[in-house]
Image (spheres, rainbow, N blue to C red):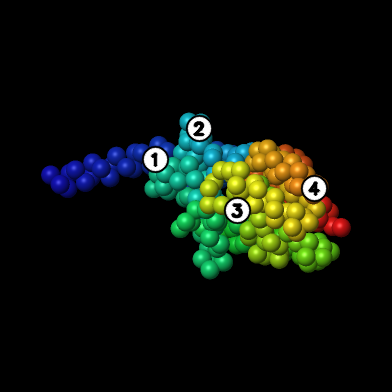
Amino acid sequence: MIKQTAIAIVTLLLVIIGGCSQGNAVQDNGKIKVVTTVGMITDIVENVGGDYVEVTGLMGPGVDPHLYKASEGDVQTLADADIIFYGGLHLEAKMSEIFEEMDARITTVPVSKNIPREKLLDFIGYPGQYDPHIWFDVSLWMSATETVRDTLIEYDPEHKERYDANADAYLQKLKELDNYVRQKVGELPEDKRILVTAHDAFHYFGKAYGFEVVGLQGISTQSAAGTGDVQRLVGFIVEKKIRAIFVESSVPERNIKAVKEAARAKGWDVAIGGELFSDAMGNQDTFEGTYIGMVTHNIDTIVNALTP
Ligand SMILES: [Zn+2]
């Protein structure tokens, strides 16, 4: 009886698995169906997977991954995937359960998984969590690239050579990007390396490239900025004579504008130095719509606005 039940369950599972995916077989067009969350991950997969993958990114320009909830359509898209890549470390805070469910039958991989824990920062305001914004340290994003490469090779070993070659080429570009960021930072006097922005996306950037990073939300443990936070931040800006503060593409502008107004009331005119891409890239088919373009835009914007 038990044996019969077990056989029935196994049969049922086989039917479900057979119906939902084709195992390691590729799709009709011969491509592996990959679904990603943020654009930065989509970009890695396109670069490393090349012609062998068909990538669907769920989150476009200006989308905040911390708040993003999967639609019914997204769940269907995820269920139809061969491989799912996401950021992990609770970046996609509202999607954790979906990823757990998908992981039971689809290769579901957080790209942060091979970063040594000692390289991760605590997430200010979220006790017990790591900061998920790893893409702002280019060397950590290189680890994410290697994780994508290794996953694709494991899934599709036949094309290992191509994935290796694609990944090598992309990693080389990322190394050059890392060098570029360091060179730009080097142009800025050390006491000007202070980045004030609306939320806490830039701590890996600060640690990797030697900036003091002050986020409006990070100044307290509340996730929403209150008036007390604004006053403390304004005091800091006036005292340090900070030339510019920055808005972010996926965060409402009003918080940082309130800071600017309050600083002016205290007699210090701080500029809005421009828009930084934090948790989403720029528009598709633009340079800023790539990871390399996004990082380049950010460092150019920061250094130009803070240079005396
Ligand atoms: Zn964020």
Q: Residue at x 23, y 41 (%)?
A: 8
Q: Nearer the viewer, mark 1 or mark 4?
A: 4
Q: CA distance from mark 2 to mark 3?
A: 33 Å
Q: Which quarter of the figure has residue 288?
A: top right
Residue type at tag 4? Gly
Residue that lies at the very extreme toward the left in this rendered image: 1
Query: Where's the C terminus, which quadrant?
Result: bottom right
Q: Label 4: which residue?
A: 267
Residue type at tag 2? Ser
Horizontal and vertical percent position of residue 115? 55, 63
Horizontal and vertical percent position of residue 185? 78, 63
Can you tell which mark lies on residue 68? Answer: none
Horizontal and vertical percent position of residue 300? 80, 54
Can you tell which mark lies on residue 18? Answer: 1
Can you tell which mark lies on residue 219? Answer: 3
Q: Earlier in the sequence, mark 3 or mark 4?
A: 3
Q: Determine whether the residue tagged by mark 2 lies in a helix, strand or loop.
A: loop
Q: Is mark 3 within 8 Å of ligand 1?
A: no
Residue type at tag 3? Ile
Q: Is residue 5 above or below residue 207?
A: above
Q: Earlier in the sequence, mark 1 or mark 4?
A: 1
Q: CA distance from mark 4 to mark 2?
A: 47 Å
